[in-house]
Every structure is written in C-alpha cells, then in structure tokens.
C-alpha cells in the first residue's frame, strides 16, 4: 500500500451527491496519482482500501480529502489518535452558514476547497475554488428516443420532485407556454419520496386541469448510465431549483448539447450557464419569468439551435471531469511537497 498518496473517505452507505462525486472522480484521478477511497458500498471499479486497514498503512505523509463532517472527523481521529501523518483537505459544496462543529473540524485542515465562490464565502478559512466537472466522454449527444416521443420537442426537469427543486415553478411555466405551442411537451424525471407524494399529486392535478396530461409527463428516475440518453432527448433543459450546493444537471445537459434555463444565484448555476449564449438565467421562484423565457426560446428556433451548438464546447472548456481531477491532484502534490 506504499503507493497510496491520497485517501478519499466515503463513510455514508446511502447514495448521495458526495458518494456520486467520489465514484466518478477517483477513477479519473487514479490515472494520475496514487489515490483510493475508503468506506462501505463502493463500486468495484473505484480504487479503495478498507477503513480498518488505513491506520496500519506504512507511515508517511498522505492527504485525507473529506467532503462530509463525519469523514473529516475520522481524519482528525486518525491524525490525533493514531498519529498518522495526514494532510487534511475539506471540500465545501454548500452555501449554508457553517456550524461551530464544522468550524472546529475545519480548523484541523491544511487546505480548503470550495466548488463555487458562494460556498467559499461561508467557510472560516480561504478556499481554493475547484468546480465540479462532468465526464464529457460519457455525457455527450446521443440518438433521440429515450422518452419514446419522437414527434415532440421536450423541455425537461430532472431530479427530486419537491418544492425546493422548483418543480412547481416548472409545471406552472409549462402550463402557460404549451397550450399555444403544439409539438412541444414537458417531462419531469426523478424520485418522489413518500413525504412528497401529495406535492406530486397536486402537480398532476394542475397539469390535468390545464388539459396537458398527455403533454407534460412524469418519468421514473433513470439509472446513471441512462442519463446521457435522457438529456439528449430534450430540446431545452430547465434547472429551476431554489437551493443547491453546486448542481450538476445544467453542465450534464449542456455536455449533451442541450441549452439550459437555470435559476440565478442558486448553486453554481451563474458560473455554469452563459446567459444568452448557452441558455438563460432566471429568478428563482418566478414561474411567470420562466414561462416568458421558455416561450422566447421556443419561438426563436435559430438562436435556440445556436445555443445547442455551443453548449458542449462550453462544458469541455470549463467543466470537464478531467479538469477537476487535475486541479485536485495539483493541490495534493503541493501539500505532499511541504
């Protein structure tokens, strides 16, 4: 195990955004540096070491890159109790004000990373800004047909179906836009938790009342491997969230050649979407404004096609997974050299 330079803990078994980050990023990083994950439930293709073996690794400096408080606490214990020579790194991917507990944990860190400037602003120490990226070899344009509606141009909204994701704003906007625009439809794809079933039922009732039950449809959450096909079946992707830590869906959609409408001031959407070039930014919780923007895009097919034409190149230049991996690896090497 002497080749291990970096350990990325993932101590939460339930699938989450952090787990997804570890799973997609570490195999790319491992081509360039000795990095492994540790924790339960990791796929076999992710280089990893069992947590119980970590304290018994040969004694030399290593980086411990945590993305949750629990992962950071484990690093503090390994460093203070087991006397491991760890260089501590923590990534902030949330714009929420940090608690005293988090601030205490972060005080043990050698370097902080933030995925967006607003996430760095809530941290007690300066951060290096390294945005998330997507694998543009995976997320790329695919043949249409995933949703089985070949004669309909689709506007999509993917992710958890709940109020904070802006799903109601999306439905309200489409109910204003679609009646006058035949040939267009909408799709809402994502998980509906038991506590949100009433919310989803209300949306279905709103759609039915507008006479659009056959044009705005719900679709079950797709597997990760199917997501490029799902994005590629859209003419426009909408990210109407009220709150995000970072938010990957806009850059995933653009990597598949799909223009994006996203909410201004939410997550990293302002940095991801070049307003008027790769899509548009709108105010959060403003369905009338969203409807106006969508109507303008639908009614101007030439500018819409131009946005689709530049969306992928924009992601390749600024938000590639390889770029994220290289930036993190450079930070690790700098820490290990000190």
Image: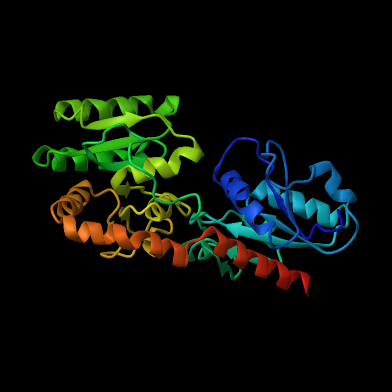
Q: Nearer the viewer, residue 196 or 296?
A: 296
Q: Position of residue 122 (x, y in %)?
A: 52, 62
- Asked if 2 appears above or below 334 in the picture, the reply is above
From the viewer's perspective, is 39 left or right of 168?
right
Q: Nearer the viewer, residue 63 or 143?
A: 143
Look at 44% across and 41% down and name the residue there: 227
Q: Position of residue 206 (x, y in %)?
A: 20, 29
- Residue 43 visible? The answer is yes
Look at 84% across and 42% down and name the residue there: 52
* Colour scheme employed for the rendering of this structure: rainbow
Q: Position of residue 50 (x, y in %)?
A: 80, 42
How many labels, in total? 0
From the viewer's perspective, is 15 left or right of 88?
left
Q: Nearer the viewer, residue 105 or 128?
A: 128
- Residue 108 visible? The answer is no
- Asked if 47 appears above or below 44 in the picture, the reply is below
Farthest left residue in view: 180
Farthest front residue in view: 143
Look at 70% across and 66% down and name the residue there: 332
Q: Position of residue 4 (x, y in %)?
A: 80, 57
- Asked if 172 appears above or below 83 in the picture, the reply is above
């Amino acid at each position: 195990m002497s080749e291990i330079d970096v350990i990325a803990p993932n101590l939460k078994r339930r699938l989450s955004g952090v787990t997804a980050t570890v799973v997609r990023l570490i195999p790319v990083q491992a081509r360039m540096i000795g990095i492994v994950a540790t924790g339960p439930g990791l796929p076999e293709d992710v280089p990893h070491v069992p947590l119980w073996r970590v304290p018994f690794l040969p004694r030399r400096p290593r980086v411990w890159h945590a993305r949750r408080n629990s992962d950071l606490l484990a690093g503090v214990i390994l460093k203070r109790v087991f006397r491991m020579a760890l260089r501590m790194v923590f990534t902030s991917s949330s714009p929420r004000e940090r608690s005293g507990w988090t601030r205490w944990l972060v005080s043990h860190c050698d370097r902080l990373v933030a995925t967006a400037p607003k996430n760095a602003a809530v941290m007690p120490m300066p951060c290096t800004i390294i945005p998330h990226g997507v694998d543009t070899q995976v997320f790329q344009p695919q043949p249409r047909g995933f949703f089985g509606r070949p004669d309909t141009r689709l506007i999509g909204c993917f992710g958890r179906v709940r109020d904070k994701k802006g799903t109601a704003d999306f439905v309200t906007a489409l109910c204003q836009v679609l009646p006058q625009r035949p040939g267009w439809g909408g799709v809402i794809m994502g998980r509906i938790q038991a506590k949100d079933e009433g919310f989803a039922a209300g949306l279905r009732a709103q759609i039915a009342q507008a006479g659009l039950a056959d044009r705005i449809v719900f679709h079950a959450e797709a597997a990760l491997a199917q997501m490029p096909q799902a994005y590629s079946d859209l003419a426009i992707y909408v990210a109407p969230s009220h709150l995000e830590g970072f938010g990957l869906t806009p850059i995933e959609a653009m990597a598949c050649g799909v223009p994006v409408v996203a909410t201004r001031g939410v997550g990293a959407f302002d940095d991801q979407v070049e307003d008027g070039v790769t899509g548009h930014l709108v105010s959060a919780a403003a369905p009338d404004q969203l409807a106006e923007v969508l109507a303008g895009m639908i009614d101007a097919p030439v500018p819409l096609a131009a946005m689709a034409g530049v969306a992928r190149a924009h992601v390749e230049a600024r938000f590639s997974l390889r770029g994220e991996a290289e930036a993190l690896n450079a930070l690790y090497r700098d820490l290990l050299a000190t």
